Image (cartoon, rainbow, N blue to C red):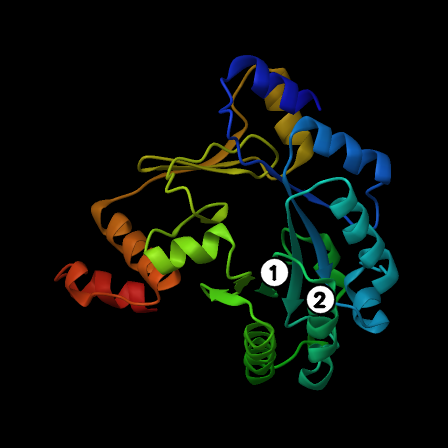
Amino acid sequence: MRAFDVTATHCALASNLDSAIEADPRLVTTTQLRWLRGLGFQRISFGVQDLPPDVQHTIGRVQSTARIADVVDIARQRGFHSLNLDLVHGLPNQTVERFGDPVDATIELAPDRVACFAYCRMPWSNPNQQRMDITELPSCAERFAMHQVAVERFTGAGYVWIGLDHFVRPNDPLALAAAAGTLTQDALGFSADGARDVIGIGVSACSEVGDLCVQNAPGLGDWQRRIDAGELPVARVHRRSTADRTRDEARRALLCQGALDLAMLPDDEQCFNRFIK
């Protein structure tokens, strides 16, 4: 609430502002959903990850299918115009045979958007991953097969496949932008508005302004200390080189248009090889 008030006080918010927020389905309440909608948030995202209890216990995110369905229904009743659900494939104890079940359950909830991410193992920054048994992780072949299950079932249910891991309704702005060739992608994901500059405010938030890439401090304590001291809570800064910009455009072309004009790549063989890798 405070962050939203500060932003609204110091920035002129557009009348057609497209605002979105992510909420934990285990913790969010009906009152909070009503309050968030009252603030003007129009789109909301809930993290499902996976549904089998053994997988949920392993990743420390236990939530019933009934609870997720209730939260989805309440969000719709409160007037959120677009609803996204997140799935993750490649988690410990997941199998190709079982992964179709959470995909089908997600389709049954009829979200407007679905993100089906690949599990990213970073135990040095995610303490919860440190207690996971790496021998229970699916193989690369199994992870790819799970991804194929998601693609086949979501597209079979009428969703449009965006990039590598997003699925949206055919009338969704992302699907329309992809069809028109105007879809873009930045630090926050896919966008249909064509904006390239992104300003991140919270913990670990990423910013992209021109050629400058910035990430805020990943720890809450460090972030708070810098804010209290009147400093920018910046942890990493990188300024894109010409080669960086070329690789970014090539990556964006593959993700947004599904094609790459090799003529856009420089003649520098090293740059080309780094991009392909």
At x 32% / y 52%, what residue is drawn?
Answer: 248
Q: Quadrant of the N terminus?
A: top right
Residue 87 x/y as whole percent? 66, 64
Disc 1 to disc 2, C-alpha distance: 8 Å
Spot occupied by residue 73 in the image (x, y as percentages of width and height): 80, 52
The numbered dot on residue 106 is 2
For the point 12% across and 62% down, the residue is 267
Neighbour tally class for label 2: few under 14, some 14-19, many 20 plus, Cα within 10 Å: many
Instruction: Please state if 112 lies on the left or on the right of 186 as rendered.
Output: right
Q: Residues within 10 Å of mark 1 (few under 14, many from 20)?
A: many
- Asked whether residue 120 is in view, the answer is no
Q: Quadrant of residue 59?
A: bottom right
Q: Is residue 167 above or below residue 176?
A: below
Q: Amino acid at mark 2?
A: Thr
Q: Which residue is mark 1?
A: 114
Q: Is residue 164 left or right of residue 60?
A: left
